Image: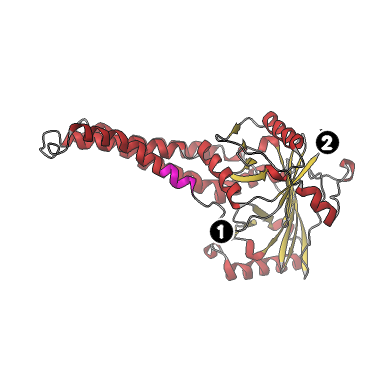
Amino acid sequence: MEPVIVQAEPTAKEINQAVFEHRCQTLLIAPVVLIFILTVLAQTYTIYQLRESDIFDCIPANVRFGFFLISPFALAGFYFFYEKNKDFTGGITPRAIKYLFTKKGVQIIDAQGTSFTKWNGITNGYDCLDSLAFVINQAVFVIPKRNFKDGEQLKNIRSLMKDRLTRFSYALGKRKTVSFENTYEKNVSINGTDVFVEKHEKKSLLPIDVPLPGPAAAKVILKCRYTGAELSEFLWRYVTRVRYVFRCVSYFCIYSLIAHYSFWSAFSLPREFEWIAPVVIGLSCFAFYQFKKSQRFKLIQACYGGRLSAVIEIGNDLVLFKTKGLKTSIAWSELSEIHETTRFFVLKTPDNLLIVIPKLSLNSEYKNMFVTNLLRRKKIQGSKDSKDF
């Protein structure tokens, strides 16, 4: 298969449609089922408590039955409708992104940089009503169908995604006739052709070399090497740990409520044993957290592409970060956190990219002074975690 490039220019509607489809497949099933179950349990508890009361006498039996039958579906449907009409763009105008599809994976190119992700690093793929979409690390990338060259190109990319992705699904709904715009070739006629790099000329995974501006002012160039354990530990500490703590707390609250209403309140079980349920649930959640923590060394950010090294150019205006599968230019204002440990500096972006700088790479007095003073100054100006310094 020859590489195929598509320039995606999605609208907010197309992005929201694709994100909602992904959430339907992964995140929304649990809360919808939970709302349904808790509503049924609450109604059962109410009926049980008021079974001998006269309060129901003034309400016809068919009305009571209809209300209790409809309520769970109505509340679950209201939540589903609320999620469907959310704006996941945050009011920000979507930017144009180029996608290069090959047999090995997908290269993503935008104004800030480029990255290459192998197919096994893409978790989900979707054929939505107006677009194709795929998911990398919970980020949903959307390619409107109108941006393809023609129906044949759209069909080929869809078939490639179906063959390479273990989770590929079709969104429900009526699909409209597509008017193809061929946005990539229109853009090429204005801005020139993308340059493919020969394999023997590079060690990178990136099929297209994207020139990015480095720091314009004073700068240092650092050649960094890591171990897998170091990268895995930082990924757990600054990204995934928070997710699993939140998930465990949510599990504890939800299952404790279900246990309380379904076993003790609804069926009048002995109150002196009610403490057993939260203890068992709490221990189960703690065991789940410890299990995920024990697996943390299996996770490394895909941008390293199996080569645990990076080249980092640091200047007063921006940071240029290059690995085997990623090349990106980041302004200091785009960094959300800066941390310091005894052996590393860790820079974090809002989309959870970690730029790890070993202090061993500061192998001269000038580099050490320049980077340390610069990071401390940037830290004071806007970091969310100044207590680490």
Left/right of residue 315 with respect to residue 296 in the rendered view:
right
For the residues bearing labels 2 and 1, Cβ distance under 8 angstroms = no
Real-space Cα separation, disc 2 to disc 1, in angstroms: 37 Å
The local crowd at label 2, few if under 14, some if 14 to 19, many if 20 or more residues have their Cα within 10 Å, is few
Q: Residue at the location (75% across, 65% down)?
A: 367
Q: What residue type is labelled 1?
A: Gly
Can residue 75 be seen? Answer: yes
Q: Percent position (x, y) of residue 53?
A: 11, 37
Mark 1 secondary-structure assignment: loop
Q: In which quarter of the image is residue 129?
A: top right
Say which residue label 1 marks.
91
Read off the magenta span. 79-85
Say which residue label 2 marks.
2
Query: Is 82 rendered above or below residue 218?
Result: above
Query: Is 270 rendered above or below residue 242?
Result: above
Left/right of residue 58 with respect to residue 196 in the rendered view:
left
- N-terminal-most mark, 2 or 1: 2
